[in-house]
Image: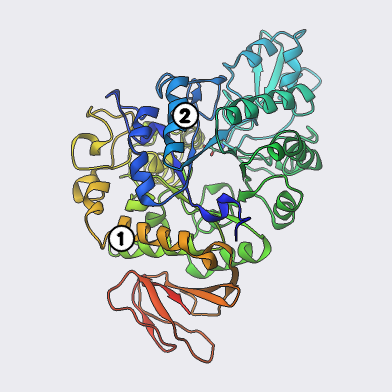
Amino acid sequence: MSDQPLWHKEAVYQIYPRSFCDSNGDGIGDIPGIISKLDYLKSLGVGIIWLSPIYASPLDDLGYDISDYYKIHPDYGTMDDFDNLVKEADKRGLKIVMDLVVNHTSDEHQWFQESMKKDSPYHDYYYWREGKKPNGKQPPNNWTSMFTGSAWQYVPSVGEWYLHLYSKKQPDLNYHNPKVIEEVEKILNFYFDKGVYGFRCDVINQIYKESLEDGKGHSFSARGIEHYLMKEGNHQILRKLYEDVFSKRDCVVIGETYAVDFKNGYRFLADHEMDMFFQFELMGVDQSKGRVFSRKFKTKNFKRIAYEWQKNIPWNANYLENHDQTRSISRFGDEKRFWKQSGKALALFNLTLRGTPFIYEGEEIGMLNKPMGEPENSRDVCALYINSIAKKMLLPRFWRKRLINRVDRDHARTPMQWDKTTSAGFSSTTSAWIPVNPNYLEGITVEDENNDPDSILSFYRKLLSIRRQSIILQEGDFEPLSSADDVIAFRRNYEGGSMMTLINLSGKEHKLGMKCGKLSGKVILSNYPGSHVFLEMTLRPYEAILLQL
Ligand code: NOJ
């Protein structure tokens, strides 16, 4: 298929720049560090690199609070370093995707600073409102932020409140103002002109607030969401960005779309608002609404949700990890008894579904959640908000510790483990900005896994290479197969050819439980020695097999 878009063929690798590779020994990852690892990424077999934000920022939400879209944060380097990264990536046939964070800016952005003058044209770049009548001492509505607590902040010098759906240092931009859309288009074109290949658009299905009426319910977070989630105005803005900018570039547009449903998701693609988007339902499989309570992980639910998205959406952005999620083996696998097997099983699942696979830094070597720490030591602004609310509610420390451990985004943000030297080879200093997971000393590192043909890393390499050469895995349709509850079984079919994925996503042996006449095919990849396949077979714990039929 010569007219395939590149993002159908290539897998995406997400880099969290702060934690990837530190070139100058200050304990913080940087752009030259990323450049020094491009050959590694090339050898892994990915084609697109998505960078979490590297722009100027006070780092309240570690870069998702931008104070200047046209500057690089000095922690990460300079604009010359960035240009160099694009050039060096290009030399190796790798594409760069940037993070577009435009639901909000930082409160330190010049637009926001200016907006505090009521007569400034920038006042209308944000949602400034008077407090509720009669005395204005209450916020304009009862919305709660995504990070819990009121979504409004009062500024005495202005005499008004501003809206922030995330931290109070992340004021929301007002998309009723056409100037804001113009600014976004300018940012997009600036980076496209530098040679970037696309954007991952942060919380892009929340940007348009249809009304500021009170929200329903009593939720600690996201109360009011019915007034701004995927409204008609939101679709129209995305459509405009497509017409004005994206349609004129050879690019990929990826939406981060919290609480997206099939109807809106389908429309995002069908109406050319974006090329693919992240759904959150699968990540909610072990969580209650609002993430505060946990639910037991069940493979049966996991596959049901994944299959539904596969069936309803023509092209998915498939992921099991990112900088906001805890590590997938710790969560969906078994880090103690079947670390290697479950790491490979999850890889096979993620990389053989229909859609673009996303791999988060460290996932390819089976990195795990960090050890539990004190809640106050988290670097995650969201975890700190939750902790302070839990404290106000007098939740005992023991329970707060457990709660924060479950939601802490720090789990995904510990430094990349390159080798067994100082700070796991991430930095020459022993004091990285966030502590290294001590398990690098047990061999969860790139260097250890590089030379081991049986490692999780080697499995990823093989799998990425198979996917790259297989039109069936790239373009084939998705056919779920009936199987035992803990067994995932599906086929991918393309022009008469088929591949089958079989995974026992549990720590116990399981019969396949497939109801079909016969089963035969060639095993092209497996995470156990000597896997062979027949209908009555028993899959070993976390056994994962890719078959060519
Ligand atoms: C989603 C990002 O992935 C997350 O890290 C951030 O905190 C929020 N959006 C706010 O920008």
Q: Please tell me whether mark 2 sits on a helix, a strand or a loop.
A: loop
Res 316 quadrant in image: bottom right
Q: In this view, does 338 lie to the left or right of 408?
A: left
Q: Which of the 4 quarters of the picture holds residue 212?
A: top right
Left or right, 473 with respect to 122, comes to left
Q: Is 438 displayed left or right of 261 in the figure?
A: left
For the point 63% across and 41% down, which residue is it?
250
Task: Write down which quadrant ligand 1 falls in.
Answer: top right
CB under 8 Å between discs 2 and 1: no
Foreground: 341 or 281? 341
Residue flagged by tag 1: what amino acid is it?
Trp
The local crowd at label 2, few if under 14, some if 14 to 19, many if 20 or more residues have their Cα within 10 Å, is: some
Q: Does the residue labelled 2 lie within 8 Å of ligand 1?
A: yes
> Does 34 appear above or below 170?
below
Q: How many marks?
A: 2
Q: Which of 18 and 159 is in front in this view?
A: 18
Q: Circle 1 sits in a helix, a strand or a loop, which is it?
A: helix
Q: Which mark is residue 62?
A: 2
Indicate the position of residue 468 as horizontal and vertical percent values. Answer: 46, 59
Q: In this view, does 538 lie above or below 205?
A: below
Q: Quadrant of the N terminus?
A: bottom right
Q: Is residue 49 left or right of residue 479?
A: left
Q: Ligand 1: does it lie within 8 Å of the C-beta at label 1?
A: no
Q: Which residue is drawn at 56% across and 19% down?
A: 68
Residue 248 visible at all: yes
Q: Which label was assigned to residue 339?
A: 1
Which residue lies most toward the front here?
A: 2
Q: Residue at x 39, y 31 (%)?
A: 18
Q: Where's residue 403, x and y in %? A: 44, 45
Q: In the rendered structure, which amino acid carries the disc numbered 2?
A: Leu
